[in-house]
Amino acid sequence: MLRYKVTIAYDGTQFAGFQLQTKQRTVQSVLEKAVKTIAKSATRIVVNGSGRTDAGVHALGQVVHFDFPFELPAPAMLKALNSMLPLDVVVKDCQIASPDFHARYGTTGKRYVYRVNRGYYTNPFRRFYTGHWKYSLDVAKIKAALPDFVGTHDFSSFAASGGSVKNKVRTIFAATVTEDPSNDELVFEFYGNGFLYNMVRIMVGVALEIGNERRPVHDILRLYEVKDRTQARYTAPASGLYLKKVYYGDGPADLPAINDK
C-alpha cells in the first residue's frame, strides 16, 4: 500500500460538509468514489481529512491522505483524480507520503479566512461565498480587539455547544482583518494550532459586534473568563469561511499536534 498526501480546494456550497454522512453529498464521499474508481477496487478506500468543514464552508487548501493498493506516480494520481472529481472540487497538489503521515493527527496548525460583505443588501453573486453584515462597523475597534485572540486561551465561550471535544485550550498565532474596498468586504484571517467546532465563525461574530459597538473593545478577555458559549451570541454564516492552509511542521510556529480529546 502506498500513502498519498493530497491538497484539495472545494466550493462547499453544494456539500453537506467534508465528513461522510448517510445519503448526503460530502467532500469525503466524492473523493472516496474517485479513489475507488481509479483503484478498480471492490472495497472502500478511506480518505482521511485534516479536519471537518461544515455544510457551506469552503477550502483553499484542505489536506487529505489515503492508502492506495498499487504505485501510481504522484502527477498521474493528480490527473486521474481531477478527471474523476466534480467541478466543485479540484486537486491542487499530490505527493507520495511516508507511511506514518496522517492528515489529521500530524497537523501543527491551520489558517482560516473569513470574508464579510458589508453592503446593506445581500449581494446575490456573493451570497454563497461571504458572510453578510449590513450594520455600521468601526474597523479600528475591530483591529484593536483582535490581538486579544492571540496567545493560549481557553476558548470554551467560542465553541459551539454540544461538541465532544473536552480540551478547549488552543493557541492562536495571528488574528488580522483587512479591508477589501473593491468588493466592499472585510477579510479576517486566523492562524492557530487548532480550532474548535464553529470557533472561527463565533470569533468573527464577536469581532463584528465589537465593531458595531454592541460590545466593549476588550470583551474577548471577559469571554475567556466566563466560559459561556451563550454570551458570545452571534455565529457568522458558514458561507464566508475558507480553510486556507494546513501546516505539518512547515509553518512559522512548529508546535506539537493538538489531540482533540
Image (cartoon, rainbow, N blue to C red):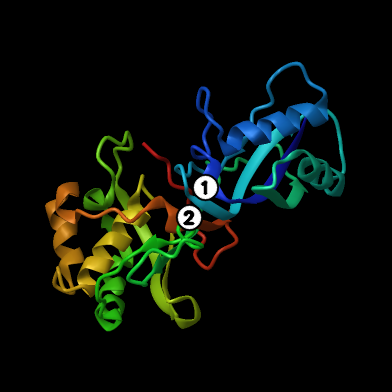
Whole-number angstrom distance, CA of label 2 to CA of label 1: 6 Å
Quadrant containing the N terminus is top right
What is the x, y in percent for residue 92? Answer: 71, 54
Q: Which residue is mark 2?
A: 128
Q: Which residue is mark 1?
A: 13
Is 213 rendered above or below residue 79? below
Write the residue at 12% across / 53% down. Answer: 226
Q: Are marks 2 and 1 in contact (CB under 8 Å)?
A: yes
The image quadrant that residue 209 belongs to is: bottom left
Write the residue at 19% across / 57% down. Answer: 224
What is the x, y in percent for residue 187? Answer: 43, 71
With 143 as the anchor, is 84 left or right in this view? right
135 or 38: nearer the eye?
135
Is 231 rendered above or below residue 51? below
Crowd around label 1: few <14 · some 14–19 · many ≥20 (10 Å): some
Task: Identify residue type, mark 2.
Answer: Phe
